[in-house]
Amino acid sequence: MTNNEAEAGALHLALQRLEQLERAGHPQVCGNVRVFGDSQLVIKWHLGLFRKVSKASLYQSIMGSKDIIKHHRWRPTFRNIPRALNCATDDMCRRSRSLPG
């Protein structure tokens, strides 16, 4: 699994959780959602700057995220954080790849 795949998958899972909280009536799930990531591909794809993703798993995660966003009242903003400034998160991504499942 690449860092891009890990980040796209994590974003999809986070949006699914946000969707669950919204359905449960959680009071803080409304308005804007800020997404920070160090994957230029994932961030730029969501901003509409990239159009093509070659890996099927990456494409499925990104399209799943876009579908969730399309059906909710909250609107995320996306910001790229360069990996050099995001060492802790990059390390978590690397460690998560070694987990089973």
Image (spheres, rainbow, N blue to C red):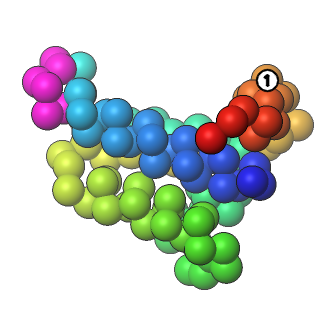
In the rendered structure, which segment of residues is drawn in magenta?
22-27
Q: Nearer the viewer, residue 68 or 55?
A: 55
Q: Relative to 90, does residue 52 appear above or below in the rendering? A: below
Residue 30 seen in render: no
Determine the residue positioned at 59% across, 74% down: 56
- Residue 29 at x, y = what percent? 24, 27
- Residue 59 at x, y = what percent? 54, 70
Residue 91 seen in render: yes
Q: Relative to 75, does residue 87 appear above or below in the rendering? A: above
Q: Nearer the viewer, residue 49 or 20?
A: 20
Image quadrant of residue 31? top left
Q: Name, please, the residue furthest toward the right.
A: 84
Query: In the rendered structure, does residue 1 fall within the stretch colored magenta?
Result: no
Determine the residue positioned at 30% across, 54% down: 68
- Residue 37 at x, y = what percent? 64, 42
Q: Relative to 96, does residue 3 appear above or below in the rendering? A: below
User: What secondary structure characterizes most of the magenta part?
Assistant: loop
Q: Name, please, the residue furthest toward the top.
A: 27
Determine the residue positioned at 75% across, 40% down: 97
Q: Secondary structure at mark 1?
A: helix
